[in-house]
């Protein structure tokens, strides 16, 4: 039996540690907000569970995505974020039921909103959306890929779809985990943050 990737092992270790820390934290006086990367985040939001709170306290919550946004964003950017639950089944996640949501065509939203940066973390659903996406107006795409849900050929299909629009992975400055920053090489240097 093959060992799981190191990022998965680390994630599971942090989950166990996080649950223990959260149990200890509950004994203290509860806070109503938490500071995270200069943002005040309300703890009363729906979906704020112990894993998220502890990851925020340790400055690890979605850190590769935050790092990628810091590298990708410039003043005046228009950002469209795709973040929904998974459309793919996975035995390791808890089933919280199925809900219906209204569907819109992504290319219609892109045409109307005109983003130049796309952020995408849709738990494997990127395979269905990205190859059909008109990414010609995007300067950058920050995406968490899901190699635990998609095959190597499917991940290559996503890369090829973005490459067809001139967007290529920036491997010169890795973000960590499975988060990739795809950028268009415009020849212009972005201002450093």
Image: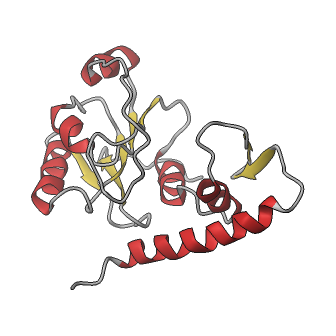
The front one of 55 and 112 is 55
- Please give the count of numbered marks on the rendered protein: 0
Please identify the quadrant where the N terminus is shown.
bottom left
Q: Residue furthest left?
A: 153
Give percent across and percent down for residue 129: 23, 35
Q: Quadrant of residue 171?
A: bottom left
Q: Residue at x 21, y 28 (%)?
A: 134
Q: Residue at x 31, y 50 (%)?
A: 182
The front one of 37 and 193 is 37
The front one of 168 and 100 is 100
Give percent across and percent down for residue 19: 63, 67
Q: Residue at x 22, y 38 (%)?
A: 130
Give percent across and percent down for residue 56: 66, 57
Give percent across and percent down for residue 15: 55, 68
Q: Residue at x 54, y 52 (%)?
A: 66
For this view, does 105 lie left or right of residue 14?
left
Q: Quadrant of residue 40?
A: top right
In this picture, is 109 found above or below 20? above
In this picture, is 41 found above or below 56? above
Colour scheme of the picture: secondary structure
Q: Quadrant of residue 170?
A: bottom left
In this picture, is 116 found above or below 169? above
In this picture, is 159 found above or below 133? below
């Amino acid at each position: 039996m093959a060992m799981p990737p190191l990022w998965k092992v680390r994630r599971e270790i942090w989950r166990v540690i996080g649950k223990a820390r959260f149990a200890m934290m509950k004994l203290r006086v509860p806070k109503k907000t938490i500071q995270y990367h200069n943002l005040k985040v309300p703890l009363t939001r729906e979906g704020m569970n112990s894993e998220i709170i502890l990851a925020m306290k340790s400055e690890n919550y979605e850190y590769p995505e935050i790092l990628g946004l810091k590298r990708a964003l410039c003043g005046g950017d228009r950002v469209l974020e795709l973040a929904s639950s998974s459309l793919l089944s996975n035995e390791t996640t808890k089933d919280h039921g199925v809900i219906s949501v209204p569907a819109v065509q992504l290319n219609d939203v892109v045409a109307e909103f005109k983003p130049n940066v796309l952020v995408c973390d849709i738990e494997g659903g990127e395979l269905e959306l990205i190859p059909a996406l008109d990414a010609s107006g995007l300067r950058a795409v920050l995406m968490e890929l899901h190699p635990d849900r998609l095959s190597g050929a499917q991940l290559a299909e996503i890369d090829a779809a973005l490459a067809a629009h001139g967007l290529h992975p920036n491997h010169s400055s890795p973000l960590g985990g499975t988060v990739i920053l795809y950028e268009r090489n415009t020849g212009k240097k972005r201002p450093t943050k």
